[in-house]
Amino acid sequence: MADERDGGCARHSARKARTLPAWRSVTADPRTRHRRRRADRRTRTCGGPGTAASSRLCRTSKPSGRRVIRPRAHVDALAPVYHGSISDAELAGLGFRRDQVIDFSVNSNPLGPSPAAIAAVQAATWSHYPDDRATVLRGELACREGRGVEQVIVANGSSELIWLLATAFIDPGQSAVVVGPTFGEYARAVRIAGGVIHEHRATPEDQFTVDFVAIEALARDRRARIVFICNPNNPTGVLASIADIEALALKLPESLIVVDEAYRPFVDEPRSSLPLTELDNIVLLRSLTKDYALAGLRLGYALAASAVVDALDKVRPPWSVNVIAQIAGLAALGDEEHLRRGRDEVRRARAYVTEALSALELRVLPSAANYVLLDVGDAGMARSALLRHGIVVRDCTSFGLPNFIRVGLRTVQECERLVAACEAADLASIGAPQCGAVSGP
Ligand SMILES: Cc1ncc(COP(=O)(O)O)c(C=O)c1O
């Protein structure tokens, strides 16, 4: 209790006491008055003396004597999720401006946004509120995907949808399953909702293959409300089959199977996942920030049964998809040629990087996505070594993979700079245990 006893602010307490109801102040005995005031303050501020809330909310006070209101205990315990891009401060410390480095830590269309989207943004007016239901954009997406508008929800990036799913479907204490190592926001969103995360972890020894039998057993055992499958997975680039996902959804009718397809547009000739949305417990998450390079504008959508979409809509903050994102999204969707060229560039870059880095005796894992994992022995050292050459890569230590860096596939020309930097930094000598590309699923 941060009151006068443990360094709480006496002036603050006195001010609060003055705001007590008038009837309190007419009590004759000053000691009774004092006791009542203290009890009253405890009840209003802390949920009553001796309660868990009282000790949690008011225990701490800053040395300055100011009261610190603590967040909910499970929020207090959360660790931040590291997303891996480089900060301006780190760049400045190395004497670089942002335009002097090539950022391979991001995984988006190497050609950047479509010129049509840029032109639409430049012409946009945005002094009015956005259409809260993004009617035109939703209609366009529904039409493209051959689904009803009631099966589509648009959001401020697919990460907002991950949060909405946890908010709408996870009660405190309920479980969700993730297939690690993977994108950290699934676990964070579930934990913020008060849920519990269970991880089935794929291993480098098995080339990070997804074991659906193990996932089903874990989800059943923990009565998982949600199973998150990132497909292809970030950071491993492993692609699970649609047939395996469908079989899992049929075996787990009590769980929502959330398939995050943020990087699916970069998969070569993927089998369509759309038929999965015939199942009521499947949610497909799509992002327009990778394939259409709208990361700074924030845009994503989900396809799901209308009942799921309705639930997400209920917990969605208002106007979360801004005017410019809606306009840019529509323009970007209309420029299919730009997306096709971006995909082709990624395909060429994947082949080039795999061959050139393998020739440098670096171990390159096969990837279906627009990034590859490299086993470099010590990810932190490798990242620092490449940074000195103006190349930014993703250190995968925060994924629990301290041996690996992830390299986003950019234009072939930019990838040549990456390969030259790997050679100049003698990356292979940092500690890669094996040579050549490994074969995989
Ligand atoms: C697998 C995965 N899903 C979702 C996201 C979030 O994407 P968005 O920008 O659409 O919020 C990311 C971002 O890095 C990601 O890697």
Image (tube, rainbow, N blue to C red):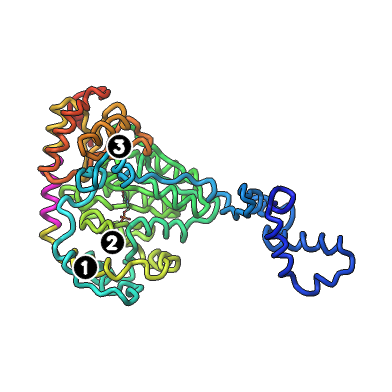
Q: Is mark 2 within 8 Å of ligand 1?
A: no
**Figure quadrant of residue 11:** bottom right
Residue 431 on image: x %, y %: 27, 23
Q: Mark 2–mark 1 contact, CB under 8 Å?
A: yes
Q: CA distance from mark 3 to mark 2?
A: 33 Å
Q: Identify which residue is drawn at 75% across, 63% down.
A: 40
Q: Amino acid at mark 3?
A: Thr
From the viewer's side, name the closer residue of 33 and 439: 33
Label 3 or label 2, whichever lies nearer to me, is 2
From the viewer's side, name the closer residue of 201 and 347: 347
Q: CA distance from mark 2 to mark 1?
A: 10 Å
Residue 157 horizontal side relative to residue 435, left or right: right
Residue carrying label 2:
297
Q: Amino acid at mark 2?
A: Leu
Residue carrying label 3:
209
Q: Identify which residue is drawn at 30% across, 44% down.
A: 86
Q: Amino acid at mark 1?
A: Val
Q: Is mark 1 within 8 Å of ligand 1?
A: no
Residue 277 on image: x %, y %: 31, 60
Q: Label 2: few (<14), some or many (≥20) within 10 Å?
A: some
Badge count: 3
Q: Mark 3 or mark 1, which has the lower sequence index?
A: 1
Residue 7 horizontal side relative to residue 343, left or right: right
Residue carrying label 1:
121
Q: Mark 2 or mark 1, which has the lower sequence index?
A: 1
Tag 1 secondary structure: helix
Q: CA distance from mark 3 to mark 1?
A: 41 Å
403 in the magenta segment: no
Which region of the structure is painted magenta?
A: 339-350
